[in-house]
Image (spheres, rainbow, N blue to C red):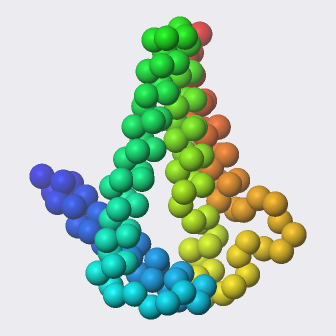
Amino acid sequence: MFSTLADIVIGFFEFVMDVLLFRGQRRAQGHRERSAMEDTIEVARFDFVTLFFIALVSAGLMFVLAFAFGVPAGWSMGIGLAVGTIWGGLAVPPVGARAMIGTRHWPLPGTQRSAGSYAIGAIGKAACKLCAPRG
């Protein structure tokens, strides 16, 4: 019971922080000011539509790999999680960008990959190791 309430409270504060970070990023990039309601709707659309679609496609990929192509369940889960993680990471601003909201130095000059893409690669590799069949 307590963990459910804690998850709801944490989810609420996470959503509020996402809206505040989104507003800060828009302000730092010089975009026009919008009302808090417009920004809230935009973050909610991203959270509930875009990320749900990514999760749905990732789960569909897992099932197609497992049932249509006969890939072992562990591998299909690892590949589906890796694809969803990478796609979600490309849809969400890099981790380093959130720390640099007030600056205009992201992405760093001369870098081809962001810190977020390295983190995404590490998460995908861990998901593949976790879901790989043991034999």
How many numbered marks appear?
0
Closest to the observer, 7 or 58:
58
Residue at the location (73% across, 81% down)? 105
In the image, residue 28 sits, relative to residue 46, either above or below, namely below
Residue at the location (52% across, 36% down)? 81
Please identify the quadrant where the C terminus is shown: top right
Residue 8 image point, x, y percent:
22, 61
Residue 44, quarter of picture: bottom left
Closest to the observer, 17 or 42:
42
Left or right: 106, with 90 as reference point: right
In the image, residue 63 sits, relative to residue 45, either above or below, namely above
Residue 93 image point, x, y percent:
57, 65
The answer to whether residue 10 is seen in the rendering is: no
Residue 31 image point, x, y percent:
54, 87
Left or right: 121, with 81 as reference point: right
Residue at the location (71% across, 76% down)? 106
The answer to whether residue 33 is seen in the rendering is: yes
